[in-house]
Image (spheres, helix red, strand yellow):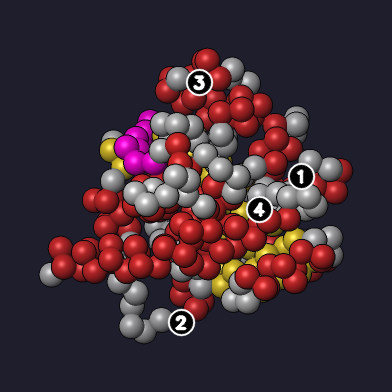
């Protein structure tokens, strides 16, 4: 299926008048270890701007001031406070782990805490270095069916065992059988595709102006926020976030040689407002 603004209109609806911040989901973002501290900040910027009701960031203590200087709306705590981390894992609706997490022994322990602590009603987004750590796990007992994987081609090679040259649709769908049935895969490349079971979504937005550090961190943060707000159809929410990420980049690229991930985040609220109004007119 083609992923375009029609799907986005189906997902992004006007907000109910009777609602509060808890109505739009609690997102926990985990990552940002030295020297990749900025990654989780970009994810947090995207999650807040994409409308998640409450965003909490678990990152290195030294990274919290940098985060709050750019995003006072997010809460934050020391990721190495494992007691607090376990508590926050229980409270979240959506967990995102990986942006700037690194692949240290401590990072591996953090991933294990998430994999064992996530509950069946929660959604889990695994991105970046957490995908590489996951590839090193001999076996995983998945606590939730609501799993989203966001690898680029090399990360998918490590996770699936498929060389990049063999990452066609049939092989990718076969490799996904190792994961829970509802798993959504965002296979990132110059022609990104989204998989869930036999369903494959194709994007015709995006371009080389997005080839810059932090772009995937921003996408992961957007996906987490969309899944938190629009949890009913996991595939549609992930697909809408992925479409919007590249559609915004397309527009910004009309006046820019490259598009900064933070610029995409700043544009998200206006785009969601426009799409929600178009959706409302269509229904009326």
- Image location (x, y in percent) of residue 199: 36, 34
Q: CA distance from mark 4 to mark 2?
A: 28 Å
Single out the mark in the foreground, 4 or 3.
4
- Image location (x, y in percent) of residue 238: 43, 49
Quarter of the image containing the N terminus?
top left
Q: Which mark is residue 168?
A: none
Instruction: Residue at 53%, 68% (x, y): give it.
Output: 48
Instruction: Residue at 55%, 20% (x, y): give it.
Output: 164
In magenta, the rendered stretch is 196-206
Q: CA distance from mark 2 to mark 1?
A: 35 Å
Quarter of the image containing the C terminus?
bottom left
Instruction: Residue at 44%, 45% (x, y): give it.
Output: 257
Is residue 221 shown left or right of residue 191? right
Badge 1 is on which residue? 102
Single out the mark in the foreground, 4 or 2.
4
Instruction: Residue at 61%, 54% (x, y): give it.
Output: 96
Q: Which mark is residue 167?
A: 3
Q: CA distance from mark 4 to mark 3?
A: 27 Å
Q: Which sits in the foreground, 189 or 228?
A: 189
Check if mark 1's residue and mark 3's residue have beta carbons within 8 Å: no
Q: Earlier in the sequence, mark 1 or mark 3?
A: 1
Check if mark 4's residue and mark 2's residue have beta carbons within 8 Å: no
Residue farthest to the right, as pictured: 105
Badge 2 is on which residue? 20
Is residue 69 shown left or right of residue 176? right
């Amino acid at each position: 299926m083609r992923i375009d603004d029609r799907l986005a209109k189906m997902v992004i609806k006007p907000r109910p008048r009777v609602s509060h911040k808890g109505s739009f989901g609690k997102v926990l973002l985990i990552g940002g270890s030295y020297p990749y501290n900025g990654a989780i900040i970009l994810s947090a910027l995207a999650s807040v701007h994409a409308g998640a009701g409450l965003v909490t960031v678990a990152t290195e203590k030294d990274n919290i001031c940098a985060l709050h200087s750019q995003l006072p709306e997010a809460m934050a705590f020391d990721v190495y406070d494992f007691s607090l981390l376990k508590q926050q894992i229980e409270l979240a609706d959506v967990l995102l782990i990986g942006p700037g997490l690194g692949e240290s022994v401590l990072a591996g322990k953090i991933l294990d805490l998430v994999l064992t602590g996530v509950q069946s009603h929660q959604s889990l987004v695994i991105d970046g270095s957490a995908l590489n750590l996951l590839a090193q796990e001999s076996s995983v007992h998945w606590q939730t069916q609501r799993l989203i994987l966001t690898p680029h081609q090399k990360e998918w090679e490590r996770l699936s065992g498929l060389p990049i040259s063999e990452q066609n649709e049939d092989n990718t769908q076969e490799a996904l059988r190792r994961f829970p049935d509802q798993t959504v895969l965002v296979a990132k490349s110059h022609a990104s595709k989204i998989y869930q079971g036999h369903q494959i979504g194709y994007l015709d937005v995006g371009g080389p102006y997005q080839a810059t550090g932090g772009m995937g961190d921003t996408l992961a943060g957007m996906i987490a926020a969309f899944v938190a707000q629009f949890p009913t159809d996991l595939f549609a929410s992930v697909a809408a976030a992925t479409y919007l990420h590249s559609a915004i980049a397309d527009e910004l690229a009309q006046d820019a040689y490259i598009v900064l991930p933070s610029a995409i985040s700043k544009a998200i609220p206006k785009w969601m407002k426009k799409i929600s109004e178009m959706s409302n007119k269509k229904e009326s």
